[in-house]
Image (tube, helix red, strand yellow):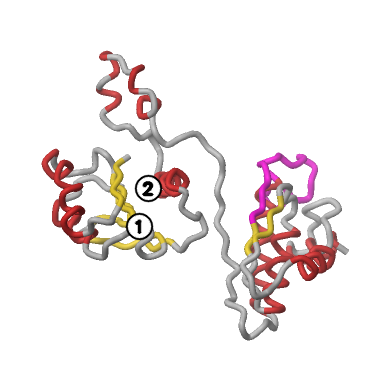
Amino acid sequence: MGTKEVSGLFDRVKVFDHPKPTDVIVRILQLSTQPSSQDLVVDFFAGSATTAHAVLIQNARDGGNRRCISIQIAEEISEKAEAKKLGFTSIAQISKERIRRAGKKILEGETHPDWNRDVGFRVLKVDTSNMKDVYYRPDELKQSNLLDMVDNVKEGRTAEDLLFQVLVDWGVDLTLPIRRETVQGKTVFFVDDNALVACFERGITEDLVKELAGPAPLRVVFRDNGFISDAVKINVTQIFRQLSPSTEVKAI
């Protein structure tokens, strides 16, 4: 049953051996969760993502708003596996693609009128810190590598990488809606509107700081070396103290 269900999403290709049927997990959800709540379902061994698929099915049936966290290491699949023919190299890739295809199929069918039709998900992975070691251990800095430490962020890290590290450091819910906007020519992230505002661009001016302080966000974060001048960097705290005294200001 489970094998037929999954292969049906992947053009009849058997991408996973012995997956659980969603009906079993759906029944568990019916017995242990409520559609009116925001229950969190956690699957520590996601495999083919049967649990995530079942959560989407049950939400679509009863208009629920259950959330699901699926955890899966990037375990490589066999070179002889059928999934290799579709370009998959790990179980985690199969998990993600099944959720995408399952969500699309569910949206094409009949659903509960009160369901928010949310089949989106975020993919996060465990990685090393975005910050160079000196950021956490300044006592180990030597004069010979001062120039290398002008930027305390590791090479190749994106603004999204920095944003999610800040969310983790501050204990902000990683599932909150994130909006990206261009403000005075700079990319700015708004997490749950005003829960957190982040700008990791360089060349941040005092005018931009004042504009971001206007809506009085709960938290705001900038890149430590992102300001156009030392004067602007020094004035940031004072600007928020005047325009939005309740905002917590941070630079990384």
Residue projecting furthest to the front = 246
Q: Decide: few, some or many residues near mark 1? Use Cα within 10 Å; few <14, some 14-19, many ≥20.
A: many
Residue 248 shown in magenta = no
Q: Secondary structure at mark 2?
A: helix
Task: Work out whether residue 111 or residue 88 is closer to the camera in this orientation and state it.
Answer: 111
Circle 2 is placed at which residue position?
159
Instruction: Say which residue appears at 56% left-offset and 40% top-offset.
Output: 126
Quadrant (top left, top right, bottom left, bottom right) of the C terminus: top left
Up-down relation of residue 84 to residue 136 (above or below): below
Task: Work out whether residue 155 or residue 125 is closer to the camera in this orientation and state it.
Answer: 125
Circle 1 is placed at which residue position?
189
Q: Check whether the beta carbons of the residues at disc 2 and disc 1 lie within 8 A of each other.
A: yes
Residue type at numbered disc 2: Ala
Residue type at numbered disc 1: Phe
Mark 2 or mark 1, whichever is nearer to me: 1
Quadrant (top left, top right, bottom left, bottom right) of the N terminus: bottom right
